[in-house]
Image (cartoon, rainbow, N blue to C red):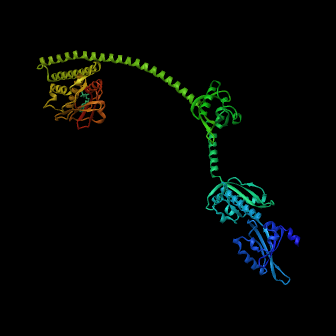
Amino acid sequence: MASIVDSSDDAIITKNLDGVITSWNAAAQRIFGYTAEEAVGQPIQMLIPDDHLDEEPFILQRIRRGERIRHYETIRKAKNGTLLEISLTVSPIVNEEGKVVGASKIVRDIRKEVRAREDLQQSEEQFRVTLNSIGDAVIATDHSGKITFMNSVAEGLTGWATAEAVGMPLDCAFRIVNEFTRAPVENPVEKVLAEGKAVALANHTLLIARDGTERPIDDSGAPIRGGSSNLMGVVLVFRDVTKRREAELTALRLGAIVQNSDDAIIGKNLDGIITNWNEGAKRIFGYSADEIIGQSVRRLIPADLQIEEDKILERLRKGDRVSHFETTRIRKDGTHIPISLSISPIKDQAGHIVGASKIARDISERKAAEKALFEARQKLQCHADELEQKIRERTEDLERTVGELELFSYSLTHDMRAPLRSIRSFVEIVLEQNREKLDPNGVELLEKTVDSVKRMDRLILELLQFTRMSRSPVTMEPVDLERLISGIIRERVEFQPPKAEMEINTPLLRVSGNETSLTQCLTNLLDNAVKFVPRGVTPHVRISTERNEQGVRLWIEDNGIGIEKESRQRLFELFQRVHKNSYPGTGIGLAIVRKAVERTHGQVGVESEPGKGSRFWLQLLGERA
Ligand code: ADP
């Protein structure tokens, strides 16, 4: 018994009921530092720190009652004053009569255990913090699939707080379905438990959070094994891949756009090696992607244009783009093809230029069209030149013919006046000398002959005026309209009271024109103004001028019979008479007016309404300052 006590690792100490130490083994000496001689006979309180002194009466009380105290963890003090973490087991010592006479204490130094426990706590805390700080969501379960841990990211994604989730079966907090079929996805924990190894989750998995929010996730599960490598549970790691999925989708879309483009879209690195080749490129250049990827882009460039690639690369390295550069490339079959090139640098995530994208458009059709257009234009120009030449020649011919005709009609009309004058004189002589001898019928016929001759002479005279108007050269000069018109009125009784009333809205503006032609125009217009009035009405004519953008407008307004709309424009052509049967005339007067004003860069027109008079106007140039 004594040897067991001595070889024990634990301190074994006995004391009597007064708390005095009665025995002290070797381990007690090792733990507390006192030798047996020093300790035996001393009060047990020497081992108890001041703030633990109240434990002793309590322990003694229980010992007296014959009770034991097991594995009581407390602090004691060594000889050198250091505090020791110990585990106490105290048992009563009973004499033959069954009376408690003292106590035996087994004291275990538990410093190592305490440290180990603290270390464990610390490392657990560290794990918790670590798991909460990582960007991925983590859920751990026990071997039956019940949640034991959730980090904050997992809380965020599932919508469950750890406190609520712990103890729940995994699929309550971690609801996953297939994105397309919406069928529940196999519980990864069950899968890990069944297979005993790490598994990745199926693709297209949606996590449905507590509030119904759905997120695409990516996850994996791994078994948690204990020291003896038995399965303790499963740890599930997952992340929200919404952003990545969007990026993938964008990449897919871009890829599809590139593939389906009509243009050739080619990627190359900075050494000019082709890295990408779309369908458009295949169609335009004839090479398949397999044939050309990895080859130098120079294969597409004709020998005499190789320098272009050097220049392009130089610009790309500077980060410049090349837009719509028209050039020629070679197809697989050796034929040349005109293309329009746009080249942009490709940068990596850090912004370094790593290559270039080339978009090449086949412009052979456009080039052909341009060529055809150019040729057509040239042909057209040739035709136009020819046509112009022909027109020039014909115009000259026509002018000559017109000149001849004008001369002819001028001489004809001119020469016709002399015989007419003779006829008129002879008839008048016959009438004068033989009026009594002739029967009344004969006299009437001869008088009609004189009238006809007069009308014919008037016609010829006006025609002469008309032809003269087109033949004689005109000069522009300042004209005092007021003086001119007053003169015309003074010369003709038809324009004066009581035959007519002329109202001149003075002062009339001065104009630039030809006085002779203007006199002719105004006489003709005034003639018409006093002529075309209803029978018995005194003509009232108002003459005025106004300034406008083109110069000066001269108005001659009458109170006559007016003109219907349909007839208004043709009045200015030769021999046009609207009121043929009721009024005499030749239909030449207004044609002369038009010719005359047009030769002096003016215009003529009329505003009228039947029964409400007419307003003839001449647009003339204002007098130059
Ligand atoms: P003429 O007076 O000799 O008939 P014009 O050429 O001067 O020839 O005029 C052509 C026609 O225009 C006239 O016959 C007449 O019907 C119409 N006309 C001209 N001036 C007026 C006017 N002031 N009022 C009504 N009709 C007019």
Q: Nearer the viewer, residue 267 or 463?
A: 267
Whether residue 360 is visible to the viewer of this picture, yes or no, is no
Q: Nearer the viewer, residue 83 or 477?
A: 83
- Please state the horizontal and vertical placement of residue 305, each as a whole percent of the image: 62, 25
Report the residue at 75% width, 55% height from top: 198
- Please state the horizontal and vertical placement of residue 360, each as a whole percent of the image: 61, 33
Q: Quadrant of residue 416?
A: top left
Vertical order, 521 against 77 (above or below): above
Report the residue at 77% width, 71% height from top: 88
- Please state the horizontal and vertical placement of residue 230, each as a whole percent of the image: 80, 61
Q: Quadrant of residue 299?
A: top right
Whether residue 601 is visible to the viewer of this picture, yes or no, is yes
Quarter of the image with the C terminus is top left
The count of marks equals 0
Q: Please indicate whether residue 319 sits to the left or right of residue 422 in the image.
A: right
Ligand 1: give its quadrant: top left
Report the residue at 77% width, 81% height from top: 64
Instruction: Give the residue at the far bottom of this rendering.
Output: 97
Q: Nearer the viewer, residue 271 or 133?
A: 133
Report the residue at 74% width, 62% height from top: 115
Quarter of the image with the N terminus is bottom right
Instruction: Give the residue at the far front of this rendering.
Output: 37
Vertical order, 620 against 82 (above or below): above
Q: Please indicate whether residue 261 sits to the left or right of residue 432 in the image.
A: right
Q: Quadrant of residue 294?
A: top right
Vertical order, 82 against 327 (above or below): below
Q: Please indicate whether residue 242 sits to the left or right of residue 585 in the image.
A: right
Vertical order, 438 against 67 (above or below): above
Q: Please indicate whether residue 168 sits to the left or right of residue 522 in the image.
A: right
- Please state the horizontal and vertical placement of residue 309, each as a whole percent of the image: 63, 29
